[in-house]
Image (cartoon, grey):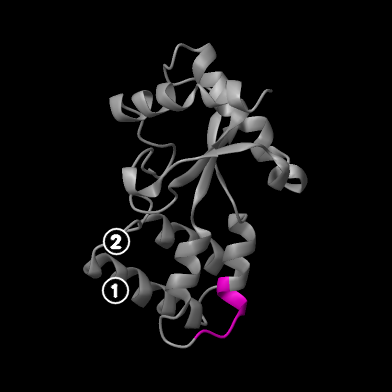
Amino acid sequence: MDWCVSEDLKKFICNGFKLIRNSTDFSEKQKFQLIDRLLSMGAGAGWRPKAISINALKLFIKNDFKKPKGIERAHIHHRRDTLNELLKKKWENDEWWDWYRERDYTILSTREENRKEKDFHKIKIIKIPLEKNLFLGKRVGYVYGDREKNFLRNISHKLDETKL
């Protein structure tokens, strides 16, 4: 499975989601914040990059494949939009889970690319095969070790192929 959360954690998150969403004790803003934190518990399995931008790869190359500053996991679908839809749409049982899971993937990008939401869909990327389990998400940042470094070295030749 390419996005794996233990059944116990999934059950905890789904139950917490229902509890928060149906609560009359929290404002909409509080629900938004609580659900965001609850969902981040699955960050070790989610928030995985499906791709890396050409500019992010260039930054790794420039830094001799040491983890450079200025690389971020940019959500393909902005988290703000995803959370708003999670709160507002009528969901039956836990049907939201698969929908959310598909929207939870990221792209490794430069900070500047991530900040330009309007143009984000235009950035040039190289795919990262999910089955390789690279760049696993953390609450903040991502895992970067020898496996990730070797992967980036191996794909860096694609820069020549793209004739940038």
Indicate whether residue 90 is drawn in magenta: yes
Q: Which residues are magenta?
A: 86-91
On screen, residue 49 above or below 46: above
- Who's the residue at 59% across and 38% down the image? 125
Pointer 1 residue: 11
Mark 2: which amino acid? Val
Residue 140 as seen in the image, left or right of residue 28: left
Residue 145 as seen in the image, left or right of residue 164: left
Mark 1: which amino acid? Lys
On screen, residue 67 above or below 88: above
Indicate whether residue 156 is drawn in magenta: no
Please tell me which residue lies in front, 32 or 81.
Answer: 81
Residue 72 place in picture, x, y as percent: 54, 35
Please tell me which residue lies in front, 154 or 65.
Answer: 154
Please tell me which residue lies in front, 107 or 6.
Answer: 107
The dot on residue 5 is: 2
- Who's the residue at 76% across and 44% down the image? 119
**Pointer 1 or 2: first along the chain:** 2
On screen, residue 66 above or below 30: above
Task: Answer few, some or many: residues within 10 Å of disc 1's Cα (few below 14, many 20 plus, some between 14 and 19).
Answer: few
What is the CA distance from the residue labelled 1 to the residue labelled 2?
10 Å
Task: Name which quarter of the figure residue 42 lies in.
Answer: bottom left
Task: Answer few, some or many: residues within 10 Å of disc 2's Cα (few below 14, many 20 plus, some between 14 and 19).
Answer: some
